[in-house]
Image: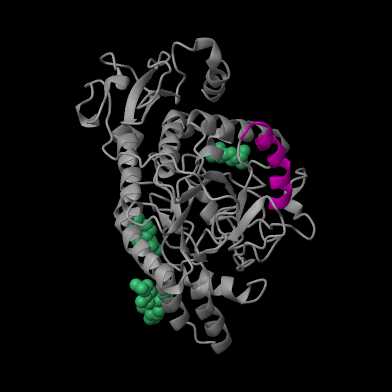
Amino acid sequence: MLSAFLALVAILPAFANAQALYSQCGGTGWSGATTCVSGAVCTVLNPYYSQCLPGTATTTSNPTTTTSNPTTSNSGTTTVSSAPTGTQTPAAGNPFEGHNIWLTPFYAAEVAAAAANITDATTKAAAQSVAQIPTFTWFDTIAKVPDLGTYLANASALGKSSGTPSLVQIIVYDLPDRDCAAAASNGEFSIADNGQANYFNYIDQLVAQIKPFPDVRVVAIIEPDSLANLVTNLSVEKCANAQTTYLACVTYAIQQLNTLGNVYSYLDAGHAGWLGWPANLQPAANLFASLFKSAGSPSFVRGLATDVANYNALSAASPDPITQGNSNYDEIHYINALTPLLTSSGFPAHFIVDQGRSGVQNIRQQWGDWCNVKGAGFGMRPTINTGYTAIDAIVWAKPGGECDGTSNTSSARYDYHCGLSDADQPAPEAGTWFQEYFTTLVQKASPPL
Ligand SMILES: *[C@@H]1O[C@H](CO)[C@@H](O)[C@H](O)[C@H]1NC(C)=O
Ligand SMILES: *[C@@H]1O[C@H](CO)[C@@H](O)[C@H](O)[C@H]1NC(C)=O
Ligand SMILES: *[C@@H]1O[C@H](CO)[C@@H](O)[C@H](O)[C@H]1NC(C)=O
Ligand SMILES: *[C@@H]1O[C@H](CO)[C@@H](O)[C@H](O)[C@H]1NC(C)=O
């Protein structure tokens, strides 16, 4: 399916009278073809943009006739009520520059409660200091989306009172059939049960929360693991089934966020031990580039996020033995290997790298072990002085202390990785607080807190 999709994109110019899957097929000012290749239907996303999405047309759609009121468009099309604000130009350079990264009160409260339970005075003080380190907020259910407006209102007020605008870091993470190659992070939406429409609604709600706050800059990591799963895990039935939906949903997310003019997106790109294997680099670059192009090259897509919620070093003193066989044994080797492939295919090669739990190396038995790895410590502090021009920022994407997945074998979301001998146990459900794990992250932090 993936190769078929890429082939379609590649031969697009030969079929100028029928647009390829995920290509534009209508909207205000559009003068190109308004029909889609077989298996795709031209769908009105907003008055300015119609897109060929997987499906079969029930009526002949003619989105270019849609004028001022998109809700009256033909019955064979899907309409989305939020209209974009038009094309805006991103600021030149690193989007983190000139901003204060806003601290999420939710994580600060988790950390404060955790620190209160630590008796050793030195560890307690170190734990308390974590509340001052910015992390990303994961919008992993639609119920959490209204929090974003509250956060942005606070960030906006702080920006105005301090004179330096705020930057709020979010993770867009609610795909239908989420985490298709694992079980611990199964999401709330199912493809079989209206998942794509539910996801589009989730994105519309995020957009509606952000729209009133153009003075706050937002940095968004888009859907951890999703595209990497499409590169390497299509042999998993759930991933193969999810492929067209993931592509349509991620496309919709970056297009809609792009209309706001203050949201800079980084697509998740796995990590060195996943897409960094030499055989995976070119297929990964091809997927990122083809998705980006067919989405209309949204100008606020800034690049890729790597090592999200993982443990790899940015630059390892020496290769961890588990990385044997991969010359790209840390994130900087991975980034340096991927950059020319992205650049030559027209994808913006800028990166942010999660180092939140990468303080201690050589603690895993297999490179693929990702669940609550024992002995991990907080890593490099977030900074824009990264030492590498390709890297916009070192970030803490995973809020350290929030559990990766339960070790309870009876739980519906049990994943065997969370029961491995290098996984800290007993572990509660994914996303809930894991006090003992947090304490270890604090004690083993490198550099120390
Ligand atoms: C702190 O300790 C209290 C009492 O033992 C417990 O109820 C609470 O859940 C603990 N909080 C955390 C974050 O572990
Ligand atoms: C923003 O939130 C913080 C932490 O919740 C609070 O202390 C502060 O008063 C708020 N500031 C504004 C301007 O709303
Ligand atoms: C997904 O792909 C990765 C990388 O090739 C592999 O290590 C992993 O075992 C795969 N997962 C499943 C469930 O097949
Ligand atoms: C493990 O999960 C099962 C099923 O949800 C639950 O009944 C049980 O109480 C859990 N055990 C622990 C130790 O949390």
Specify the farthest residue to the left.
72
Q: In which quarter of the image is residue 408?
A: bottom left
Quadrant in the picture for the C terminus = bottom right
Front residue of 335 and 375: 335
- Tell me which residue sits at (74%, 46%) in the image: 328
- Tell me which residue sits at (44%, 83%) in the image: 116
Specify the farthest residue to the bottom.
121
Q: In this view, does 202 lie above or below 55?
A: below
| Image x and y of residue 146, in percent | 29, 57
* Magenta residues, dominant SS class: helix
| Image x and y of residue 72, in percent | 19, 27
Front residue of 178 and 425: 178
| Image x and y of residue 74, in percent | 23, 21
| Callout count | 0
> Does residue 329 appear anywhere in the picture?
no
- Tell me which residue sits at (56%, 53%) in the image: 308
Q: Is residue 354 above or below residue 328?
A: below
Residue 292 part of the magenta-drawn span: no
Q: In this view, does 281 lie above or below 302?
A: above
Side (left or right) of 85 relative to 448 = left
| Image x and y of residue 208, in percent | 31, 49
Q: State which region is magenta.
A: 330-346
